Image (cartoon, rainbow, N blue to C red):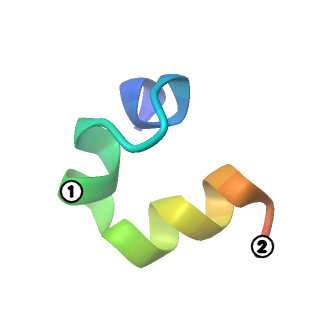
Amino acid sequence: AVRGDAHAGGGGARREGSRAERVRRTGGA
């Protein structure tokens, strides 16, 4: 989910799980 973190929600969010990547990206928000 490297590009997922690079962007505000790239392919990482859709490939590893939107909620999971979202939590990791925001820091648990």
Checking the image for residue 4, the label placed there is none
Query: 8 or 25: which is nearer to us?
Result: 8
Q: Is residue 7 above or below residue 23?
A: above
Which image quarter is the N terminus in?
A: top left
- State the image quarter where residue 15 is shown: bottom left
Q: From the top left corner, tell me how far across and down residue 14 is, in percent.
A: 21, 56
Residue 7 image position (x, y, % from top left): 45, 27
Reading the image, the residue beneath label 1 is: 14
Residue sitting at x 64%, y 51%: 25
Q: Is 17 displayed left or right of 14 in the figure?
A: right
Q: What secondary structure is marked by label 1?
A: helix
Give the image location of residue 13, x and y in percent.
33, 54
- Tag 2's secondary structure? loop
Q: Is residue 9 left or right of residue 26?
A: left
Question: What residue type is disc 1 on?
Answer: Arg
Q: Which residue is mark 2?
A: 28
Q: Residue at x 76, y 75 (%)?
A: 29
